[in-house]
């Protein structure tokens, strides 16, 4: 019995010296509920934030943040009889005369992509009574990128045609082409595509896409044969990537066939050796080099 009592005292002392990771909860009971946004995928340039908060604390405000930056849009409050009727133990009508809140956030200054939405209920003393956080993916502009050429991964020439079309609800956009992350600066003329306008709906009109077709002939003479990455981005005038396409290509610019007539065997029994053969290639300025044990002869 003495041993158990002794161990209990040691355990209590250890708890006193171990730092706690648990934050002290506020004495005020607060319930925060978010109705909107319902999904993580936001496909517009405005976003409604809508919900309600019940609390035993009277002087509180709702603050909305995206990526840690507070949004200054107006937050409207309103009565919610349905909430008062159901939610008990989190203050009365006296503390929560208008528990409902709503704000329409303007997202035009945000780039498309992943963001963090955070909503805090804050007391007039700056204490956070309740908080809510979620990841959202912003896609303000609908953009469809189609690539007609190149059709195969095997490119057997020193030029490559990149041909396709793009439709978007965003007007001021450009197409950028990269090979292995390096942008190619070749001219890229655009052209009207009546067939595209006739079929593709919901991705902008002729006004936003007067010439959806594009074509560029890339010069690959500076790119070595082998595997490379072709990437095509549709970029807004603000630098946002509206759509992207990526694929691996295997470049084989020059067809070359090498044939060796002599020596015919691996065993050479003399102090001279004839090397005899021929080479055919689509490349003109070529030479033949011979090595033994890595040393050029």
Image (cartoon, helix red, strand yellow):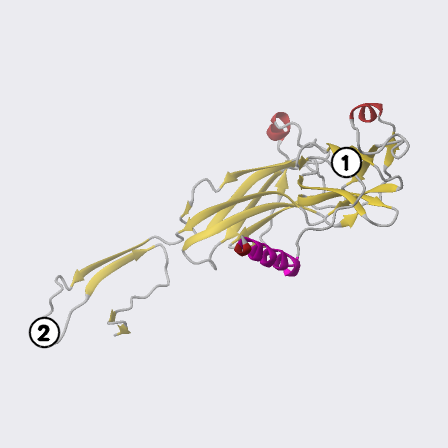
Classify mark 2: helix, strand or loop. Answer: loop
Tell me the distance, in whole angstroms, between the alpha carbons under discs 2 and 1.
94 Å
4 or 185: nearer the eye? 4
Asked if residue 161 lies left or right of residue 127, the reply is left
Residue 141 image point, x, y percent: 69, 37
Q: Mark 1 and mark 2 in contact (Cβ < 8 Å)? A: no
191 or 163: nearer the eye? 163
Residue 17 image point, x, y percent: 64, 61
Residue 265 image point, x, y percent: 12, 62
The answer to whether any part of residue 47 appears in the image is no
User: What residue is at 12 percent from the left and 76 percent from the top?
Assistant: 271
Question: On the rendered image, what quadrant is the C terminus found in?
Answer: bottom left
Query: Most prominent secondary structure in the magenta stretch?
Result: helix
Label 2 or label 1, whichever comes before in sequence order? 1
The answer to whether any part of residue 84 appears in the image is yes
User: What residue is at 75 percent from the left and 38 percent from the top?
Assistant: 45
User: What residue is at 56 percent from the left and 46 percent from the top?
Assistant: 232
Vertical relation: 131 (above or below) 80: below
Asked if residue 84 lies left or right of residue 19, the reply is right
Chain part drawn in magenta = 4-19
Residue 43: which quarter of the image?
top right
Question: Tag 2: Cα neighbours inside 10 Å, few (<14), some, or many (≥20)?
Answer: few
Residue 17 belongs to the span the image colors magenta: yes
Vertical relation: 209 (above or below) 183: above
Classify mark 1: helix, strand or loop. Answer: strand
Residue 211: which quarter of the image?
top right
Residue designated by label 2: 270
Residue 229 image point, x, y percent: 48, 51
Question: Tag 1: Cα neighbours inside 10 Å, few (<14), some, or many (≥20)?
Answer: some
Residue ranking furthest to the left: 269
Residue designated by label 1: 31
């Amino acid at each position: 019995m003495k041993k158990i009592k002794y161990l209990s005292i040691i355990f209590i002392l250890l708890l006193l010296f171990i730092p706690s990771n648990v934050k002290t909860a506020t004495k005020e009971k607060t319930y925060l509920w978010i109705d909107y946004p319902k999904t993580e995928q936001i496909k517009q340039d405005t976003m409604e934030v809508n919900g309600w908060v019940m609390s035993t604390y009277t002087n509180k405000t709702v603050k909305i943040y995206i990526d840690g930056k507070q949004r200054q849009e107006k937050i409207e409050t309103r009565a919610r009889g349905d909430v008062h009727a159901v939610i008990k133990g989190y203050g009365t009508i006296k503390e929560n005369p208008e528990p409902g809140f709503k704000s329409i956030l303007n997202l035009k200054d945000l780039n498309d992509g992943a963001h963090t939405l955070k909503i805090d209920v804050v007391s007039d003393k700056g204490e956070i009574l309740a908080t809510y956080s979620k990841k959202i993916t912003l896609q303000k502009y609908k953009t469809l990128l189609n690539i007609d050429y190149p059709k195969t991964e095997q490119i057997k020439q020193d030029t490559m045609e990149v041909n396709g079309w793009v439709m978007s609800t965003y007007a001021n956009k450009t197409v950028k082409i990269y090979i292995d992350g390096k942008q190619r600066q070749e001219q890229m003329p655009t052209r009207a595509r009546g067939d595209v306008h006739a079929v593709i709906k919901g991705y902008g009109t002729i006004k936003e896409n007067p010439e959806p077709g594009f074509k560029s002939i890339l010069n690959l003479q500076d790119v070595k044969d082998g595997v490379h990455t072709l990437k095509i981005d549709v970029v807004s005038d603000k630098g946002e990537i509206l759509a992207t396409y990526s694929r691996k290509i295997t470049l084989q610019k020059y067809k070359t066939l090498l044939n060796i007539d002599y020596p015919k065997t691996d065993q050479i029994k003399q102090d001279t050796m004839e090397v005899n053969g021929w080479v055919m290639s689509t490349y003109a300025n070529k030479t033949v080099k011979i090595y033994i044990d890595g040393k050029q002869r």
